[in-house]
Image: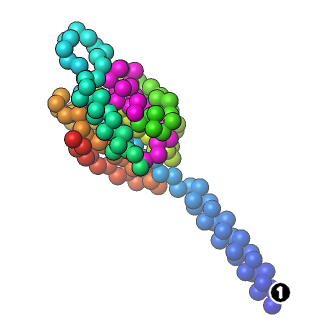
Amino acid sequence: MKSLFTFIIVFTCCASSFSQEQVKERTTTTYYLIRHAEKDRSDKSNRNPELTEIGKTRAKRWNEVFQHITFDAIYSTKYNRTIQTALPTAEQNKLEIAHYDPRNLYSEEFAEATNGKTVLVVGHSNTTPAFVNAILGIKKYQDIDDNNNGNLYIITISDGHIIDQVLTIN
């Protein structure tokens, strides 16, 4: 009887330890990538315009779309329009907006810093699909049409498996 009791204790401890190790090894990283909202196009020479009123409304709507998602990090390029698009969601999540270099998408450093996290990335018509493609490791998505500010790319990486999808939110 004593050996049966010892076996049960040892088995329970080993099973518990094994499942804890499995949980530690399994990480899920989820990226939500969007293009900035509508920008002011009145001054063609302005390379860093603000959002229009419609763009500010869209930025608030993005926050509503994301209301049930708890982000661990929010990234944006250093342009006014991307920062203003990210701001309502950053404020809701009480996060500072981190900046990324659109010429260096999904670096090893970025992948490590965001591993196991839920992350929003705000970019541009060309950098957002390029960022998605860099995560996927293939060229799957083309540049976003200039009149489209509603694409939402969702990438989930779990146990080495990558699932991607694109939605249009208007």
Task: Please state the horizontal and vertical placement of residue 37, each as a whole percent of the image.
Answer: 27, 30
Kindly identify the residue that appears in the image at 56 percent across and 55 percent down.
Answer: 25
Kindly identify the residue that appears in the image at 47 percent across and 46 percent down.
Answer: 70
- Identify which residue, 78 or 158, lies in the foreground: 78
| Left or right for 142, reference 14 | left
Any part of residue 86 in sight: yes
The boundaries of the magenta stretch are: 69-88
Any part of residue 140 in sight: no
Per the image, is 65 magenta? Answer: no
Mark 1 residue element: helix
Quadrant in which residue 24 is drawn: bottom right
Q: Disc 1 marks which amino acid?
A: Lys
- Identify which residue, 10 or 94, lies in the foreground: 94
Q: Is residue 138 above or below residue 100?
A: below
| Left or right for 31, reference 48 | right
Task: Please state the horizontal and vertical placement of residue 131, each as a whole percent of the image.
Answer: 34, 34
Task: Please state the horizontal and vertical placement of residue 122, each as a whole percent of the image.
Answer: 36, 32
Task: Please state the horizontal and vertical placement of residue 109, each as a whole percent of the image.
Answer: 50, 33
Q: Name the residue tied to disc 1.
A: 2
Dot 1 alpha-carbon crowd within 10 angstroms: few under 14, some 14 to 19, many 20 or more: few
Most extreme residue toward the right, as rendered?
2
Most extreme residue toward the top, as rendered?
45
Look at the image and tell me in which quarter the C terminus lies: top left
Quadrant in which residue 49 is drawn: top left
Per the image, is 71 magenta? Answer: yes
